[in-house]
């Protein structure tokens, strides 16, 4: 039986206002143990989208992998049986929630590579306001190492997506989207949000919310599973470029502007409607 969670009205209001909110105690210890086993399996057996996004001289390592829920049972258990999708539904104001994809992010101890400030939406092949990403750490995350957000940035504009390692403009012609401001050099100019997190806590944020994260300390590992959710207004928006993550061949099966009614994106809430 799926877990349930009632989101406080103040948290729903914060998500609408700021584009990001912290949900405390979403997962119980037994659920975290299952998820930890799935993450270790993912690290041992990376999927085809896996990559390391830290430089060779970094004393740590920043590992990323996408779209593994179909073969990692522990991920499916989190996605289908925890309260995560229900929380996303309440925050989005959605009556139906579909999975978009899962994303594993692991920074090993000593990783200096920061996650640059960016929006997720420009990297994706979808459009729609009903969306929410969950960022769920398996390890304690102090405030100085946590994911940070620019409050209200989910209202736009879209900012130019760039490659994380070389800052090269990607996917859109240079100048076609708003330039990303230098937030790190002018932190006091921005309403930056961030929370120290314990295992079981999660942050939910809109796909247009500007966010970024620093590296981690020498003694601290940071394992995170992020799950992206879509509400009923989200539509397929094929791009002329390879999206991150890619969904090869999807344009042949799902027309532009179509609802995301496809086996890759199953309904995860309500729990009685799990088929595509």
Image: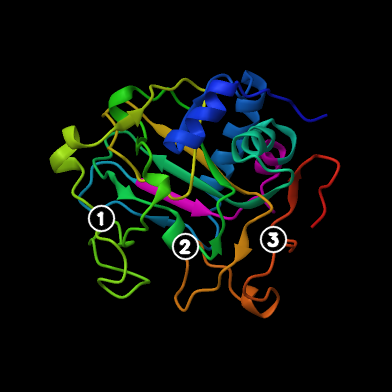
Residue at x 74% of width, y 34% of height: 81
Residue located beneath label 2 in the image = 244
In this figure, what is the number of numbered marks?
Answer: 3
The x and y percentages for residue 166 are 22, 62
- The local crowd at label 3, few if under 14, some if 14 to 19, many if 20 or more residues have their Cα within 10 Å, is some
Q: Earlier in the sequence, mark 3 or mark 2?
A: 2
Q: Earlier in the sequence, mark 2 or mark 1?
A: 1
**In this rendering, would 75 be left or right of 245?**
right
Read off the magenta span.
62-79
Q: In this view, does 108 lie to the left or right of 41?
A: left
Judging depth in this view, the residue of 51 and 114 nearest the camera is 114
Report which residue position mark 1 lands on: 180
Q: Where residue 70 sits in the image (x, y, percent)? A: 69, 53
Which numbered dot is residue 264? 3
Name the residue at 64% across, 32% down: 87
Cα separation between marks 3 and 1: 31 Å
């Amino acid at each position: 039986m799926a877990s349930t969670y009632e989101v406080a009205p103040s948290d729903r209001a914060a998500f609408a206002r700021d584009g990001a909110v912290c949900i405390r105690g979403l997962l119980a210890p037994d659920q975290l143990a299952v998820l930890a086993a799935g993450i270790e399996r993912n690290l041992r057996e990376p999927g085809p989208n896996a990559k390391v996004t830290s430089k060779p001289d970094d004393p740590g390592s920043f590992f990323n992998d996408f779209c593994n829920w179909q073969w990692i049972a522990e991920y499916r258990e989190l996605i289908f049986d925890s309260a995560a999708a229900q929380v996303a539904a309440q925050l989005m104001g959605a009556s139906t929630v579909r999975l978009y994809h899962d994303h594993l992010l692991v920074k090993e101890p000593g990783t200096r590579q920061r996650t640059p400030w960016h929006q997720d939406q420009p990297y994706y092949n979808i459009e729609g306001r009903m969306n929410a990403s969950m960022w769920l750490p398996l390890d304690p995350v102090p405030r100085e190492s946590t994911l940070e957000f620019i409050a209200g940035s989910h209202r736009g504009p879209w900012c130019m997506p760039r490659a994380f390692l070389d800052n090269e403009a990607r996917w859109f012609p240079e100048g076609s989207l708003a330039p990303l401001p230098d937030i790190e050099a002018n932190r006091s100019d921005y309403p930056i949000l961030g929370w120290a997190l314990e295992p079981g806590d999660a942050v939910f944020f809109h796909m247009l919310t500007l966010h970024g994260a620093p590296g981690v300390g020498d003694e601290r590992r940071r394992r995170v599973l992020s799950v992206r959710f879509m509400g009923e207004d989200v539509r397929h928006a094929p791009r002329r470029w390879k999206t991150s993550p890619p969904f090869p061949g999807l344009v042949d099966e799902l027309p532009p502007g179509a609802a995301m009614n496809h086996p890759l994106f199953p309904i995860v809430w309500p729990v009685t409607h799990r088929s595509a």
